[in-house]
Amino acid sequence: MSKEMGSYLDIERLASLVRKKRGSRGLRETSAEIGNVSPSTLSRVESGKMPDMETFLALCNWLEVPPAELFRSSEDDQLDTPEAIAIQLRADKNLDPAIANALASLVKAAYRDLSQNNGELKQDP
């Protein structure tokens, strides 16, 4: 059951970080702040499209995130449920980013409590 080792860019995480940092500011204003990234490219990244290397590095610099932090190994293929829900909430254009983050935190806290309770129940005969 050996998996081929490898890594890939977590484009959903990148998109989420960019949307969160941009907040309610316009694409043009944000792309001017980043530099060398057009508003249309920024929009494509926010919607989950793969950026080219130059854009990726410019975004990492702007986000103040080391590029390596946005890569996942193929071993990490399964996204845990609360993180998957958080990504979906943050990607929802109908939700204010602050509300999406609050909901994501609530889901993670509830999931953590549920996991802890299940762990205790499993130990009891």
Image: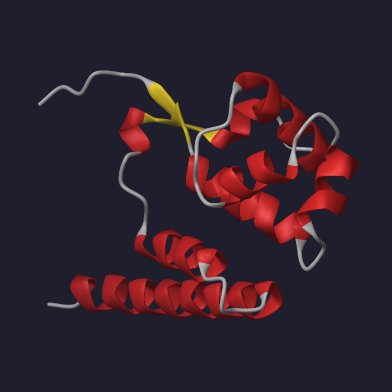
| Above-or-below relation of 45 to 74 | below
| Above-or-below relation of 74 to 77 | above
| Above-or-below relation of 67 to 77 | above
Q: Quadrant of residue 42?
A: top right
Residue 62 at x, y percent in the picture: 81, 38
> What residue is drawn where x is 86% and y is 33%?
35
Residue 95 at x, y percent in the picture: 59, 79
> What residue is drawn where x is 29% and y is 70%?
119
- In depth, the one of 42 and 11 nearer the eye is 42
**Which quarter of the rendering shows the C terminus?**
bottom left
- In depth, the one of 123 and 86 nearer the eye is 86
Tally of numbered discs: 0
> What residue is drawn where x is 52% and y is 70%?
92
**Which quarter of the rendering shows the N terminus?**
top left
Q: Is residue 121 left or right of residue 82?
A: left
Q: Is residue 117 left or right of residue 99?
A: left
